[in-house]
Image: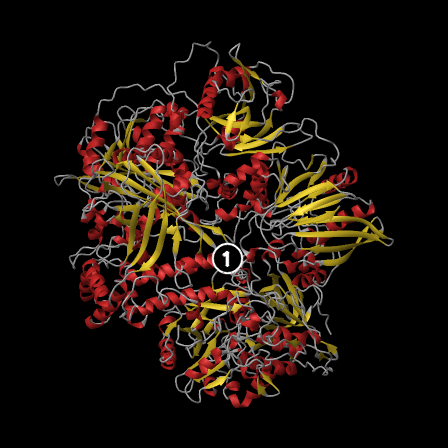
């Protein structure tokens, strides 16, 4: 009898694969098993129980079972949606329970765990009809009656019969559930029977002598039985096998097998666990005499395919053939008339749900219809998915039936688009099975030799979805359910629309789903027809019946046909027959039957019979509407003004927003908002002033203030909004309104094209019926109704309003020229004070730019239970909105017109070889190619060769400079020379006497390199200079003129500002973009969407796919609803029926990525016809990099930093006149781009000609549309103009800002007594000149002089008190850490100095007017000063500097010493330069503090711009370090916080994500509670690989930069880190998920990953001395123990024997510190010291390197030697008052650790673990039950043995920092621990 694991609660009958690996490596030449069974499903379990205990020639045979998954105990399965994702198998979660194999035709769902499919299937045991075996089966199995006894025996073994009687739901002690009765009611007479299932109906004992509990009837069978009632294989056959000596190993993935000579087989296996496999990748070769493959249909086929590739002889032509889905089909009967109760709800206690097992009844129609039907339960984890998917399909199916009801105003209780719980309760789900022909095949989706990838088998089956059997299944079920009152909806992925509407999608169907894949290794009589014989033995070839008699396949893969019923029993019967026959053939003698002892009781992982907390997430909606309104103020005249309404609504439950959930979605306008920027208010502006501001570039925060100042009227508003309320309508009215609109919008064209094209749709009458039905729904009217009241007018208004009522409405319905998104963004005013009755101007539109200005989304989460629950509720809300959208706007989602013209064989995206000229002449092109060296794209990939292609249209005898043109991104040289555009740029300028050159760069859509992930830097630094030099060589004067469009202007600017174009350019004309670019608000949004989706989309994005799929069709229909201006509607949707617009597909796909490319009204038909030659392939990686430009309205490098655009670089390199043309209605770059260009170029003294804004022009149409003529004329004038030489003198004014990141403060004693700060500059500014430090006094919100708060700041005072710090790091990288001078060392410090804080600012060489226009300042001429050598002559000026105002020179400054001396560097840091900095500080201090409170910004979403918010408080460091800190703990103690694991935020949850930091910030201002003096951060401050989140940056640079920037620029994080010193450690999240060495020495890539992560950590989280590992505070000593980066490699064998968590030197340092530091003392580490994890104690609880289970832990218990050495040292030396602090488990824990010798207690240690700051996803967090709460461990040290008694407690769940206070109590030192919920636990330490 094998041992059972009764202690770890992680397994019972199995052991980890690591134990077998150890055994094999110790004896590699031995035969390890007589029989090795691969897989533990039905075939494997039968084989194991059959062979186990048998003997061969008197010797017991050894039996091993390898299972790739893990063992599941009751309570370890998912309880709801929040836990489900961790049980889905994936590349990084290979042990996941549910394995979903996605394919184009079939999605197969299989199980992964001890017990195989029995863990999650319904346990239905049915016998196929005898006729099934008559064809396609081996002769030995043709007659079912001959071997039917095996079915009967298998039933008994599996538990579907008890004592020969079927085990059915009828036997359940609590009765049958409602769904059973509902199914019985629809069944024809004689066809229904209770299903015989393997679920306990009462407390009982099974065939494995295991105690089973009564089924709770919870409905969760399909995600695993937590109640211990399912009679799965892991509690019957596998237990029996284990009892008879079989060894079962979990976590073992078999890759392949090969002959081991005559001895048997070599089986190559690896760890399933991705982390273990990465560390121990070499497959282990297990030797076995016999091998039974039972890995399932996909698993066994994959193993044999891999083995075939390695040389295994078998019937290879049949391998993978003959696959079947078993005819599986899921069908819902949605919203029937009576209760069914088949969908579980996690908010109801499992034992109270009364749903029943997954399947309880069978309707057997195989004899008459060829189908079998079973009812199904939906587990709680899938409730939302079921509800939303089928409710949406119900909407689509319902559109085929007309709505004849009369709609009454209000919120309908029976809203057809809602999903009330009652409707789900009345829905049924059925599984239907039938014979599908078994014509599929299995293929491997990946390299069969790869060790790191398995589970790559996929089922392929051409045209499977169109097999008639599946339609017949649905028809058969429809006949039974016709009177239920519900709607029958088949698998929605397979068939999206009802039968009479499928023609709309050209009858395209999606993949089918199967839970019963069969075949691939089919049985046959010879190798000519199959892969194995009737006993599962593998044929040696396809030419005979010879077999490998010791290689057997026993699972679903050998079933040669569909069974049309559940296959489990058939597989078991086949396996039982084969195993017994093989045992006899192999001379295995059966074991003696042992007496049955007491029933075995399985351990329970946790109790799950509890309801989930029902808490709805709350969201906040913020909206601003703006538009021109003609109104008459009191005492005034009628005039059009701009009215703006800002509404911030009170936080509201998500469920309340969703109709049909019991609440009416009415939300109230919030009236008390502390932040003026987001208060609910009305503002009215003069139209001209507002429009001027709209076209002027201003920093976003400045623009909001300018708007405030420009308002003629402002006042608060309050009121309410009624969301999507139904309005009154009748069926005739709806049909008339929508039907008429449809006829004109698209109906005439649809009808004509159907007749002309023959779309295989129904006849005219059927189409009209469908149109009538759809119109009866589409004509419904829903509204968003606004009822607002204007409050008291703000002081200072210039006009008054006659009244205070505002009533407006957004109308949502299908109407003429409608667009659903536009309807949701536009409000029509019905009532407004002073509104002219007949005014046509009464529409306000959503101001998306406002949301960017205030940095919050329109819709954000402000409270939640957890992230998954919120996502579920968001899906519910969005599902309702989607259904309403489909119901009312189905006609808005129109597929692009079919292009009836013959498709071009090739699309030519390169300039033509013959250029047509106006008047009919033409000129032949010359082609020049410039080969470029191979280069690796910055966005990723391998080295790529490329070229610049220059097309020249030579002008004979031209005396003018040649003109070169650079195209934009996603376009090519055809922009300038396409034949459909006449005249085009090339032909026009050729006619002006120019030699024309068109450059096609490597990014050109006409180049094969277009889809590579190039950065714009690479193109600007290589391609553009090469082109310029080549063309300039042909110029009379060696220079060229340039025209550059869009991103062509960017790459040209990169070349110029890098000095690559010096002397080559005479003048340049830009269209739409330049080195500065302000993106349109809609384009900003698209940039963020692409950034988030980039990892989920293919990098190559096609505008016009050659062979559109169903997904393409759906995407095109969705994009057809993009909200273009209503004036463009008739162009895309012409009224004339015969007119087609196939070009809309390309247009919509382009605009979805980048914004509106052109105004279609300006495009000529011929140009649109060839649109695919104007735009083409691109890389999403490159497209997404424009997000960096968005942040700063400036071009940046691919890392997001502006290294080029500055006063200095423009002055140095931009030596030629520049001109811009911009479209007034540009949808990509905002018209304020040219204003920003004017400002920046003017500041640098560069000649920027007055730009030309083309009224009514868009982006691309300014070049290829009708508006191009104006563009050509203005550029020609510029190029031919006589522009005087010379340049305006560059400005020299400077500006100061608080740091963009930081200041972050820390202490680094004893290295330095000074405070150390680290900070970063805004990436929008090229160079940071210096950090300026100023001693201040804070009085309320005011920043005052420390000597006299009443005195104003002035330049003279500032010159005498400022310290400047300059460094190369700050200059080059925009980041540095440095010491802050001690207060006594600050210049001007004296007795009058009552300063209490330090102001830290960064100085930039930019004009104040550019950075913050409020600071505009006319600089007086500077006084004459001595001419001294400049920085270029004297070298860089780095260090600390102060001014000697008497001598008017600078001095070097020592922040901690005693001397300030003049030096060459001090001279280089010119006094005049410092004066300008002081003047900039004076201007900044004179600016009033923002009137808005900071609270609004603290909880706001991250601003979408890296724009510096001008709030000087962000630069205040209030902390004053003590001059002489105590060396030993002070009696008063100290307070601090302990924090860890800040999960990254998504689009909507930042308000909740940083609440933990907000709580710390609040505590810093509080007068009570534990007020921290410093903060400890112990890992996970950022996540470089948030695989459970929405966005994971993948490029190397972004991965280790963007997460830090997002974290450190967040308002509440800044508030905390600038006020108190912080001390930080890193964990794996800062490097890579679960990072540790993967080999010894480590793999280069893995070591490189660590290096980049550590470098970023040291940069962003540590100070000057990044390796400092000890500090003291208030006399308390802390040891910062890095338990991550010094780890050694671990693997089975010596790797664990020598494994150490940190280096020996660190261990020595820790021991010395433990011995000498006074207590209380704190060891800080990311990893939790104790308690241990249960998986680390599986089958071995020792603290020894021989405990192989330790390999599964990432913490201290994963390094037994290290843990034992530290505990032993503490015990041996009786060290007291030691507290270990940690935080990477995401759940708080407090453990007392008593170390005892034989005489009793030696000492006590505490291990305190903090909860996460923000860990919203339960599936990514640890469970309480995963730790060993109480245990005693033996620890050996110094020849003695100590007992280590661990007792742990968990506080209540909840995120947030832990607050700790250590103090001396009455009996000794005490530690108060305050958790996230405010509870306090006091420990005696």
- Name the outermost residue toward the right: 1799
Query: How crowded is the residue under tag 1: few (<14 C-alpha within 10 Å), some, or many (20+)?
Result: many
- Please name whichever residue, 1487 or 713, is drawn nearer the observer in this view of the structure: 713
- Name the outermost residue toward the left: 919
Vertical arrangement, residue 419 with respect to residue 59, above or below: above
Percent position of residue 350, x then y? 56, 70
Vertical arrangement, residue 716 with respect to residue 1736, above or below: above
Name the residue rendered at 53%, 37% in the picture.
1614
Percent position of residue 1164, x then y? 18, 46
Q: Quadrant of residue 1049?
A: top left
> Viewed as shown, does residue 1088 lie left or right of 1655?
left
Residue with the mark numbered 1: 868
- Secondary structure, mark 1, is helix
Q: Is residue 1252 visible?
A: yes
> Viewed as shown, does residue 1232 lie left or right of 1554?
left
Q: Is residue 1051 visible?
A: no
Figure disc tally: 1
> Viewed as shown, does residue 836 lie left or right of 219?
left
- Please name whichever residue, 1425 or 1142, is drawn nearer the observer in this view of the structure: 1425
Percent position of residue 1329, x then y? 48, 25
Quarter of the image with the N terminus in it: bottom right
Q: Quadrant of residue 1734?
A: bottom right
Vertical arrangement, residue 1853 with respect to residue 227, above or below: above
- Colour logic: secondary structure
Percent position of residue 1390, x then y? 61, 18
- Please name whichever residue, 86 or 1512, is drawn nearer the observer in this view of the structure: 1512
């Amino acid at each position: 009898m094998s041992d059972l694991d009764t202690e770890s609660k992680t397994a019972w009958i199995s052991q980890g694969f690591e134990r077998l690996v150890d055994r094999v490596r110790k004896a590699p030449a031995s035969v390890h098993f007589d029989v090795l069974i691969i897989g533990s499903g039905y075939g494997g379990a039968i084989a194991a129980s059959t062979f186990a205990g048998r003997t061969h020639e008197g010797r017991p045979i050894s039996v091993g079972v390898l299972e790739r998954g893990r063992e599941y105990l009751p309570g370890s399965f998912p309880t709801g949606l929040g836990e489900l994702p961790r049980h889905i198998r994936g590349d990084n979660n290979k042990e996941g329970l549910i394995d979903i194999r996605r394919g184009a035709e079939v999605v197969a769902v299989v199980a992964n765990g001890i017990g195989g499919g029995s863990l999650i299937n319904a346990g239905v045991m049915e016998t196929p009809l005898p006729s099934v075996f008559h064809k396609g089966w081996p002769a030995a199995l043709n007659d079912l009656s001959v071997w039917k006894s095996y079915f009967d025996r298998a039933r008994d073994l599996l538990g579907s019969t008890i004592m020969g009687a079927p085990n059915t739901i009828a036997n359940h002690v609590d009765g049958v559930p409602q769904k059973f009765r509902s199914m019985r009611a629809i069944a024809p007479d004689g066809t229904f029977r209770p299903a015989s299932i393997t679920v306990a109906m009462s407390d009982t004992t099974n065939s494995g002598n295991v105690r089973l509990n009564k089924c709770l009837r919870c409905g969760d069978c399909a995600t695993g039985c937590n109640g211990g009632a399912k009679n799965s294989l892991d509690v019957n056959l596998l237990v029996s096998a284990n009892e008879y000596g079989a060894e079962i190993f979990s976590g073992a993935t078999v890759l392949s097998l090969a002959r081991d000579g005559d001895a048997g087989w070599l089986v190559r296996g690896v760890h399933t666990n991705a982390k273990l496999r990465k560390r121990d990748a070499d497959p282990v070769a297990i030797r076995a005499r016999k091998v039974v493959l039972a890995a399932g249909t996909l698993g066994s086929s994959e193993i044999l395919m891999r083995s075939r590739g390695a040389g295994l002889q078998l019937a290879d032509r049949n391998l993978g053939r003959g696959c079947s889905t078993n005819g599986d089909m899921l069908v819902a009967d949605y919203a029937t008339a009576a209760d069914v109760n088949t969908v579980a709800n996690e908010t109801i206690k499992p034992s109270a749900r009364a749903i029943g097992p997954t399947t309880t009844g069978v309707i057997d129609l195989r004899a008459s219809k060829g189908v079998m039907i079973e009812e199904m339960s939906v587990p709680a984890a899938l409730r939302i998915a079921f509800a939303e998917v089928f409710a949406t399909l119900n909407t689509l199916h319902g559109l085929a039936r007309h709505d004849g009801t009369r709609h009454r105003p209000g919120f309908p209780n029976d809203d057809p688009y809602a999903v009330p719980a009652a409707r789900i309760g009345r829905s049924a789900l059925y599984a239907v099975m039938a014979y599908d022909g078994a014509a599929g095949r299995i293929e491997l989706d990946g390299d069969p030799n790869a060790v790191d990838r398995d589970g790559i088998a996929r089922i392929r089956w051409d045209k499977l979805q169109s097999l008639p059997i599946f339609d017949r299944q649905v028809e058969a079920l429809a006949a039974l359910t016709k009177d239920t009152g519900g709607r029958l909806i088949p698998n929605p992925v397979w068939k999206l629309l009802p039968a009479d509407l499928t023609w709309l999608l050209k009858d395209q169907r999606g993949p089918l789903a199967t839970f019963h894949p069969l075949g691939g290794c089919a049985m046959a009589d010879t190798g000519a027809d199959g892969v194995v014989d009737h006993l599962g033995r593998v044929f040696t070839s396809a030419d005979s019946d010879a077999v490998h008699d010791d290689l057997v396949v026993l699972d679903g893969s050998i079933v040669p046909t569909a069974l049309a019923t559940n296959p489990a029993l058939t597989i078991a019967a086949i396996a039982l027959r084969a195993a017994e026959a093989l045992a006899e053939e192999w001379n295995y003698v059966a074991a003696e039957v042992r007496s049955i002892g007491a029933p075995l009781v399985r351990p329970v992982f946790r109790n799950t019979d509890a309801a989930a907390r029902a808490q709805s997430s709350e969201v906040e909606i913020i909206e601003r509407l703006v538009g021109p309104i003609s109104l008459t103020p009191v005492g005034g005249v009628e005039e059009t003004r701009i009215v703006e309404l800002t509404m911030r609504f009170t936080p509201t439950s998500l469920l309340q927003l969703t109709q049909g959930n019991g609440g009416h979605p009415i939300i109230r306008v919030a009236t008390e908002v502390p932040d003026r920027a987001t208060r609910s208010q009305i503002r009215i502006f003069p139209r001209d002033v507002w429009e001027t501001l709209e076209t002027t570039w201003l920093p976003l925060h400045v623009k909001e203030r300018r708007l405030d100042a420009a308002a003629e009227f402002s006042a608060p508003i309050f009121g309410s909004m009624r969301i999507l309320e139904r309005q009154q309508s009748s069926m005739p009215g709806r049909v008339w309104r929508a039907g008429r609109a449809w006829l004109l919008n698209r109906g005439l064209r649809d009808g004509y094209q159907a007749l002309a094209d023959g779309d295989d749709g129904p006849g005219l009458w059927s189409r009209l019926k469908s149109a009538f039905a759809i119109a009866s729904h589409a004509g419904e009217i829903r509204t968003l109704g606004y009822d607002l009241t204007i409050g008291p007018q703000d002081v200072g208004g210039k006009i008054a309003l006659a009244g205070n009522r505002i009533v407006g409405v957004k109308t949502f319905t299908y109407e003429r020229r409608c667009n659903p998104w536009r309807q949701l963004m536009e409000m029509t005013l019905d009532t407004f004070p002073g509104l002219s009755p007949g005014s046509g101007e009464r529409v306000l539109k959503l101001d998306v730019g406002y949301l960017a200005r205030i940095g919050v989304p329109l819709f954000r989460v402000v409270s939640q239970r957890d992230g998954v629950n919120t996502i579920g509720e968001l899906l519910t809300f969005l599902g309702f909105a989607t259904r309403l959208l489909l119901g009312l706007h189905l006609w808005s989602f129109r597929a692009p017109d079919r292009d009836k013209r013959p498709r071009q064989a090739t699309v030519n995206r390169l300039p033509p070889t013959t250029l047509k000229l106006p008047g009919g002449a033409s000129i032949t092109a010359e082609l020049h190619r410039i080969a470029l060296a191979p280069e690796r794209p910055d966005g990723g990939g391998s080295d790529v060769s490329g070229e610049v292609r220059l097309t020249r249209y030579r002008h004979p005898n031209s005396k003018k400079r040649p003109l070169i043109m650079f195209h934009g991104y996603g376009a090519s040289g055809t922009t300038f020379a396409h034949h459909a555009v006449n005249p085009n740029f090339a032909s026009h300028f050729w006619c002006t006497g120019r030699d024309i050159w068109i450059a096609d760069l490597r990014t050109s859509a006409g180049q094969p390199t277009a889809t590579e992930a190039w950065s714009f830097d690479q193109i600007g630094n290589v391609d553009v200079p090469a082109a310029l030099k080549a063309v300039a060589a042909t110029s009379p004067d060696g220079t060229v003129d340039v025209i550059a469009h869009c991103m062509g202007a960017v790459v040209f600017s990169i070349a110029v500002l890098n000095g690559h174009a010096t002397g080559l350019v005479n003048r340049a004309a830009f269209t739409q973009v330049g080195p500065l670019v302000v993106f349109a608000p809609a384009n900003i949004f698209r940039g963020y969407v692409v950034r988030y989706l980039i990892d989920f989309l293919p990098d190559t994005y096609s505008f016009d796919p050659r062979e559109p799929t169903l997904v393409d069709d759906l995407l095109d229909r969705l994009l057809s609803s993009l909200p273009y201006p209503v004036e463009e509607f008739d162009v895309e949707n012409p009224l004339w029926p015969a007119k087609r617009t196939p070009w809309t597909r390309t247009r919509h796909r382009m605009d979805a990525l980048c914004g509106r490319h052109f105004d279609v009204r300006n495009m000529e038909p011929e140009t649109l016809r060839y649109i695919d030659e104007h735009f083409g392939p691109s890389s999403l990686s490159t497209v997404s990099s424009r997000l960096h430009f968005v942040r700063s309205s400036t071009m940046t490098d691919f890392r997001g930093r502006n290294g080029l655009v500055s006063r200095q670089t423009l002055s140095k390199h931009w030596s030629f006149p520049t001109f811009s043309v911009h479209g007034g209605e540009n949808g990509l770059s905002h018209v304020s781009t040219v204003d920003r260009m004017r400002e920046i170029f003017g500041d640098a003294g560069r000649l920027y000609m007055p730009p030309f804004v083309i009224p009514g022009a868009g982006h691309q149409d300014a070049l290829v549309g009708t508006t191009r003529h104006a563009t050509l004329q203005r550029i020609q004038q510029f190029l031919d103009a006589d522009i005087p030489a010379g340049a305006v003198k560059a400005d020299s004014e400077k500006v100061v800002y608080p740091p963009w990141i930081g200041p972050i403060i820390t202490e680094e004693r004893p290295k330095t007594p000074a405070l150390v700060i680290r900070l970063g500059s805004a990436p929008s500014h090229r160079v940071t000149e210096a950090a300026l430090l100023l001693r201040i006094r804070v009085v309320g919100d005011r920043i005052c002089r420390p000597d006299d708060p009443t005195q104003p700041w002035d330049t003279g005072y500032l010159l005498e008190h400022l310290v400047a710090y300059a460094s190369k790091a700050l200059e080059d990288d925009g980041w540095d850490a440095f010491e802050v001078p001690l207060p006594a060392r600050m210049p001007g410090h004296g007795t009058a100095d009552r300063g209490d804080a330090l102001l830290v600012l960064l100085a930039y060489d930019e004009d104040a007017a550019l950075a913050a226009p409020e600071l505009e300042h006319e600089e007086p001429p500077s006084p004459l000063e001595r001419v001294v050598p400049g920085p270029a002559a004297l070298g860089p000026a780095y260090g600390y500097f102060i001014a000697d105002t008497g001598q008017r020179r600078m001095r070097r400054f020592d922040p901690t010493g005693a001397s300030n001396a003049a030096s060459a560097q001090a001279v280089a840091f010119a006094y005049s330069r410092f004066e300008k900095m002081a003047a900039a500080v004076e201007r900044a201090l004179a600016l009033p503090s923002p009137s808005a409170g900071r609270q609004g910004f603290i909880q706001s979403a991250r601003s979408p711009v890296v724009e510096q918010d001008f709030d000087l408080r962000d630069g205040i460091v209030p902390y004053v370090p003590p001059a002489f800190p105590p060396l030993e703990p002070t009696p008063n103690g100290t307070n601090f916080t302990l924090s860890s694991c800040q999960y990254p935020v998504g689009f909507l949850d930042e308000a909740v994500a940083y609440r933990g930091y907000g709580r710390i910030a609040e505590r810093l201002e509080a007068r009570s509670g534990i007020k921290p003096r410093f903060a400890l951060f112990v890992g996970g401050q950022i996540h470089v690989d948030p695989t459970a989140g929405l966005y994971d940056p993948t490029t190397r640079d972004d991965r280790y930069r963007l997460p830090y920037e997002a974290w450190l620029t967040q308002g509440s994080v800044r508030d905390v880190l600038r006020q108190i010193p912080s001390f930080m450690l890193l964990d794996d999240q800062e490097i890579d998920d679960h990072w540790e060495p993967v080999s010894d020495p480590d793999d280069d890539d893995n070591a490189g990953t660590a290096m980049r992560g550590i470098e970023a950590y040291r940069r962003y989280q540590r100070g000057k001395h990044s390796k400092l590992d000890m500090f003291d505070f208030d006399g308390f000593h802390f040891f910062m123990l890095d338990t991550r980066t010094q780890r050694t490699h671990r693997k089975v064998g010596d790797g664990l024997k020598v494994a150490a968590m940190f280096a020996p030197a660190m261990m020595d340092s820790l021991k010395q510190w433990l011995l000498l530091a006074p207590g209380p003392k704190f060891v800080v580490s990311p990893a939790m010291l104790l308690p241990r994890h249960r998986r680390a104690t599986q089958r071995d609880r020792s603290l020894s390197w021989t405990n192989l289970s330790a390999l599964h832990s990432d913490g201290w218990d994963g390094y037994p030697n290290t843990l034992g050495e530290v505990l032993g040292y503490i015990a041996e030396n009786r060290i007291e008052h030691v507290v270990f602090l940690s935080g990477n488990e995401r759940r708080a824990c407090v453990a007392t650790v008593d170390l005892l010798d034989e005489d009793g207690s030696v000492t006590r240690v505490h291990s305190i673990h903090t909860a996460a700051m923000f860990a919203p996803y339960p599936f990514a967090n640890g469970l309480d039950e995963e730790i060993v709460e109480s245990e005693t461990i033996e620890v050996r040290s110094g020849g003695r043995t100590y007992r280590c008694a661990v007792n742990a407690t968990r506080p209540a769940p909840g995120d947030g920092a832990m607050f700790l206070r250590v103090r001396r109590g009455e009996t000794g030192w005490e530690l108060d621990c305050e958790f996230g919920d405010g509870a306090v636990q006091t420990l005696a330490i």
